[in-house]
Amino acid sequence: MSSIAEHGRPSEDGRERARPCWLGEPRRSALVDCLLLLLAVATVAICLADAHGVARLLLVLASACLLPGGALLTRLPMADPLEALGLAVAVGFCIEAAGALAMIWTGWWHPFGWALALVIAACAMFALDLRRSVAMVREPQ
C-alpha cells in the first residue's frame, strides 16, 4: 500500500503509482462504496413505495448524513475510517445547506429535486470509485 506522500511518484518499473484509496485499502473502499450504493437504492425504493414510518425516516436521515459527503470524500485519501465518517457527515450537511441556501436565494424551492440531484451525483461518484477500487484489487502486486 502506498502512502499519501508517495502519490504520483514513479515506481520501480517506471509507471506512475495509482492514487491511494479514500479509506486506505482498496477492499475496504470497495465494501464501503457498495454499502453506500445499497443505502441509496434502499432509500429511493422506500421513498417511491410511499411508505411512512420509522424505516423511511431512518433511511432518509442516514442517506442525508452519509451520501453527499461520502461521495466527495472518495476523491480524498483518508487513513482512519472514523475520521472519514465524521467528515462525511459534516461535509454532507455543508453541501445540503449550500443547496438549501441557493434554493432560498433563487426562489426555486424544490427539495425533492435537490435530493434527487444529490443522490444521482453521489451514486455516480461511488460507482466510479468502486470501479477504480476493484481494478486496484485485481491488479497484480
Image (cartoon, grey):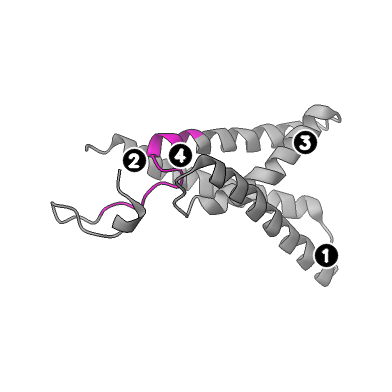
The residues colored magenta run: 17-31
C-beta proximity under 8 Å, tags 4 and 1:
no
* Quarter of image, res 108: bottom right
Mark 3–mark 1 distance (CA, rounded to whole Å):
22 Å
Q: Residues within 10 Å of mark 1 (few under 14, many from 20)?
A: few
Which residue is pictured at 77% across the width and 36% down the height? 47
Among all residues in the image, which is located at the extreme left? 13
Q: Residue furthest bottom?
A: 105
- Camera-side mark, 2 or 4: 4
Q: Specify few, some or many for label 2: CA neighbours under 10 Å numbering under 14, 14-19, or 20 or more.
A: few
Q: Which of marks 2 and 4 is nearer the N terminus?
A: 4
Residue at the spot of label 1:
108
Q: Which amino acid does label 3 sit on?
A: Cys
Q: Is mark 2 on a helix, strand or loop?
A: helix
The first of marks 1 and 2 along the sequence is 1
Residue kind at label 1, given as amino acid type: Trp
Pointer 2: what residue? 135
Q: What residue type is labelled 2?
A: Ala
Does residue 94 lie above or below 49 as drawn? below
Residue 139 on the magenta span: no
For the residue pair 112 and 99, the one nearer the viewer reads as 99
Residue at image location 29% in from the left, 56% down from the top: 6
Give the prevailing secondary structure in the magenta stretch.
loop
Please name the residue shown 29% across and 60% down the image.
Answer: 8
Q: Residue 76 carries which label?
A: none
Cα separation, mark 2 vs mark 3, equals 33 Å
Q: Are marks 3 and 4 in contact (CB under 8 Å)?
A: no
In x, y percent, where is residue 25? 39, 39
Nearer to me, 63 or 106 = 63
- Mark 2 or mark 3, earlier in chain: 3
- In the rendered image, which residue does mark 4 sit on? 29
Q: Kindly identify the amino acid type of the residue bearing the numbered disc 4.
A: Ser
